[in-house]
Amino acid sequence: MRNFAYYSPKNLADAIAAIRDSGGDILAGGTTVVDLMKIGVREPSALVDITGLAELEGHEIGADRIRFGALARMGHLADDKYLVAAAPVLTESLWKAASPQLRNVARLGGNILQRTRCPYFRDTAYAQCNKRSPGSGCAALDGGETSHHAIFGGSSACVAMYPGDWAQALIAFDAEIHTQGPGGRRRIPFADLHVLPGDTPEVETILQRGEIVTEITVPIVPALKASHYLKARDRESYAFASASAAVGVELDGDAVRDVRIALGGVAATPWRARAAEESLKGKPLTEESARAAGRIAFADARELEGSAYKIKLGADVVAGALMTAKSRANGGK
Amino acid sequence: MTSKTSPPCDGLSRRNFLRTTGAAGAALGVGIRHAAAHQPGSGVPPDAQPKIELTVNGRLRTLTVEPRTTLVEALRDTLGLTGTKIGCNQGQCGACTVLLNGDRVNSCLILALSANGAEITTIEGLANPDGSLHPMQTAFAEQDAFQCGYCTPGQILSAIACIDEGHAGSADEIREYMSGNLCRCGAYPNIVAAVESVRDSKEG
């Protein structure tokens, strides 16, 4: 790892100024940033360590929304019993990610901004990676191994997958991101935060340089209580999703009043499956309709060589997650 | 290490950096300090060797690091505490697990500067002063919970945290919450047995 200047500001204004003046990267828990620096993917001239900004810590479950400070740690939240009861999809998607050691360090703001695990992005021995070196090509599409690449949202320049879990719960439940940067404060619908790779896969979000995620808010709706995160992976624990689903339902008798479905492990960005949601609204939620919703969710998938398995697996995961959410809506586990 | 990556030690490079950064830093309230241990709110240039303070196994230590020095490097190379191992060095294997302010963490992914002021527990800090082992160390020996032993310091720190966190309720839960520690010898069943035995002796 190359050396770098290191700043540890005590307040947001100093942090924003330090990023502006140093041209450095933001450091929080560091589980992505330090990792990428070690393998030579990132070589920032400076790091601005924002973990001293106490104002970005903590979380609260309010009357109409849950607020998460951007520096709250994944592991501490996953074990919060009130959050487990109020929003199981938010805690399950946290504890099913990474390992206990990583979750004790990784912060929520960094978690939603984590970089892809595409092996050609991470291994600088490969010259071709449009995300790492714009214009250099894509080793994955040029005969590479693509069993863990995106079947939604990819482009001819990049099919790298967004690896996160918690983001799927956030997009399913209309979360918002709050930021502060050189241009002031703003509030961003979570669904607008990440951008598709298109011709510029090096651009992953709409955040401006020096713009710091300060908090994340999730509106409380009835479907949040009857929610679930189901994650299928190559091994039972501590692996990225082969396919996952963040879901929630609100029932009116037998009929679906509200339903949320987002898909992990399959897309270039966090991915909401709105057509699958629409297919269920106003109708009974049965194993048959859940399976149909799973198929609808993957109707537009564009598999790569090696990733066709995600279509069948993903549809099954959606159906299974919906049945668990239905059980929870009816007072079960 | 610095001599390999820094300009000759004529002070020019560092002085120039200090001059420019110091000016910007003063405006920002982000000053540069060298004499005392690194303070929150300050900054250090890339070729600096700032001092940090760590309380390691109950003892306050002041040590000199580089910005890029990781916590595990500081523990092993600077303090000579080589019980903590480096496996993958990418936060994937758990061999470098230590307790930081009571939380288990991968010390290979944490910058020493970021850990400034923290309390650290390593494998060397578990036994009693009279040399008697921590119950988890004894359980690993009794349950034959290792073969080559390389991952064992990290496994033991992680196992202690697993019980303290309340995640040792069943064998399945132990497997889930010990998944951040890989064992290439495959001692997993005996590791689970060791965790269960310590959990049960605590409950008893």
Image: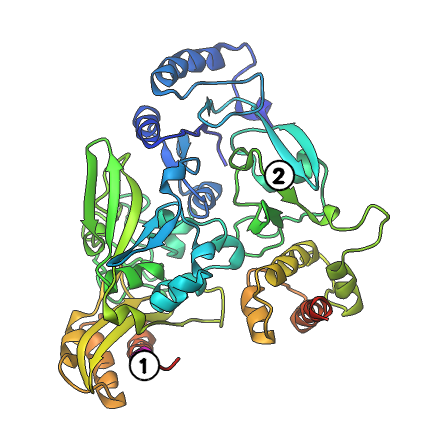
The amino acid on which the numbered mark 1 sits, given as a three-letter code, is Asp
Residue B161: give x, y in percent of width and height. Answer: 61, 57
As drawn, the label of residue A278 is none
Q: A88 and A171: which one is in front?
A: A88
Residue at (56, 75) in percent of width and height: B172
Report the residue marked by disc 1.
A316
Q: How many marks?
A: 2
> x%, y% of residue B197?
72, 70
Question: Which residues, given as a range, are shown in magenta?
Answer: A321-329
Q: Amino acid at mark 2?
A: Glu
Going by the image, does B126 lie left or right of A244? Answer: right
For numbered disc 1, what is the local secondary structure? Answer: helix
Disc 1 crowd, CA 10 A, few/some/many (<14, 14-19, 20+): many
Q: Up-down: is A245 above or below A142?
A: below
Residue B40 located within the stretch drawn in magenta: no
Q: Quadrant of the C terminus of chain A?
A: bottom left
Q: Where is residue A283 shown, x and y percent of the image?
A: 15, 85
Q: Residues within 10 Å of mark 2 (few under 14, many from 20)?
A: many
* Real-space Cα separation, disc 2 to disc 1, in angstroms: 45 Å
Q: Does residue B132 appear left or right of residue A332 in this picture? A: right
* Label drawn at residue B73: 2
Q: Label the magenta part by its dominant secondary structure.
A: helix
Chain to which mark 2 belongs: B
Residue at position x 28%, y 72% from top? A247
Q: Residue at x 42, y 43 (%)?
A: A33
Compared with residue B189, is residue A194 higher up or lower down, i.e. above or below? above
Which residue is the extreme one toward the front?
A63
| Residue at disc 2, secondary structure | helix
Depth check: A159 or A267 in front? Answer: A267
Asked if the stretch drawn in magenta spans residue A326, the answer is yes
Instruction: Indicate the chain on which mark 1 is placed.
Output: A
